Image (cartoon, rainbow, N blue to C red):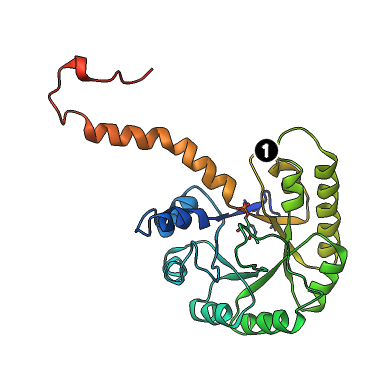
Amino acid sequence: MERANGKVLMTLLSVNIDHIATLREARRTNEPDPAAAAAICELAGAHGITVHLRGDRRHIQHRDIKILRETIKTKLNVEMAATDEMIGIALDVIPDQVTLVPELPGEITTTGGLDCTHNQPAITNAIKRLQSVNIAVSLFIDPAEQQIRAALGLGASTIELNTARYSDGTLTNRPTQEGSEALDAVRQAAELAHSRSMRVLAGHGLTYRNVRAIAEIPEIVELNIGHNIIARSALVGLDRAVRDMLALLEETKDVPPRFHRSGGI
Ligand code: PXP
């Protein structure tokens, strides 16, 4: 929500819908459809949609991002490795934003930030090619001073701070030293990046329980959240989904009551 004076009143949310595609790919079928999921997220008020096009195509496919490019009305952010193949796809699809992430074969999820102190030619080259067609570029980095300084040196104006360590330290509501140290690191990194005029985003592992402290950091303007939102949707949507199936099955048989298992509890 933006005030008339341009002040932002809330932290923006981009919903990562990879897991919708994970569910589809579990059966190699045609549902659930990421484009339908994206529309629901947007109707619910999400400010953007994020997907990760992985080299192994385990969830989101090239076709998905082409369709999402056509259907998304907010902002399409595509996470990808800084490889020639991926940059070529980005130049073909032209998402609003590309987030460069490290990618390790076989990893369950992104395991750390991009190391901007290494691989500099590949990252700079990717940034230049993407920016040449007006794609905004964000670098997913760990909340560490040397990474922010290196990202600046590479010409990045937007970063996404990796909150994985904070998330690991806040799996329950019980305060932990790891959680509070990790929160301090995110806070300090956000301040430093903002003081260098960078746009600061954050994400990874954020949940309904731990998001508040991150969202309250004034310099962080946008969050990317996936797993916890999709996990919750499976639970809050399951009751309705079962009732919908039962409604279809109702009155399909003329069976005496004693053969019915009792409905409800
Ligand atoms: N940011 C980046 C760069 C990611 O790779 C991911 C996971 O795909 C996220 C944010 C979202 O993390 P989560 O699914 O744990 O909310």
Q: Which residue is found at the position 50% from the left and 67% from the top?
A: 57
Instruction: Examine the rendered structure and indicate whether residue 117 appears above or below residue 217.
Output: below
Residue 17 in sight in this render: no
Q: Quadrant of the C terminus?
A: top left
* Residue assigned mark 1: 209
Q: Secondary structure at mark 1?
A: loop
Q: Where does the image place residue 246, in percent across and percent down from the top left?
A: 28, 32
Q: Which residue is found at the position 76% from the left and 51% from the top?
A: 165
In this picture, residue 147 sits left or right of residue 223: right
Residue type for callout 1:
Arg
Q: How many marks?
A: 1
Q: Which residue is found at the position 56% from the left and 46% from the top?
A: 229
Looking at this view, is 39 or 32 the one in front?
Answer: 32
Q: Where does the image place residue 19, in percent across and percent down from the top left?
A: 51, 54
Looking at this view, is 235 or 191 the one in front?
Answer: 235
Badge 1: residue crowd in 10 Å (few <14, some 14–19, many ≥20)? few
Looking at this view, is 7 or 69 the one in front?
Answer: 69
Instruction: Examine the rendered structure and indicate whether residue 56 appears above or below residue 206.
Output: below
Instruction: Examine the rendered structure and indicate whether residue 202 appears above or below residue 211.
Output: below
Q: Where does the image place residue 43, in percent across and percent down from the top left?
A: 46, 50
Q: Residue furthest top?
A: 258
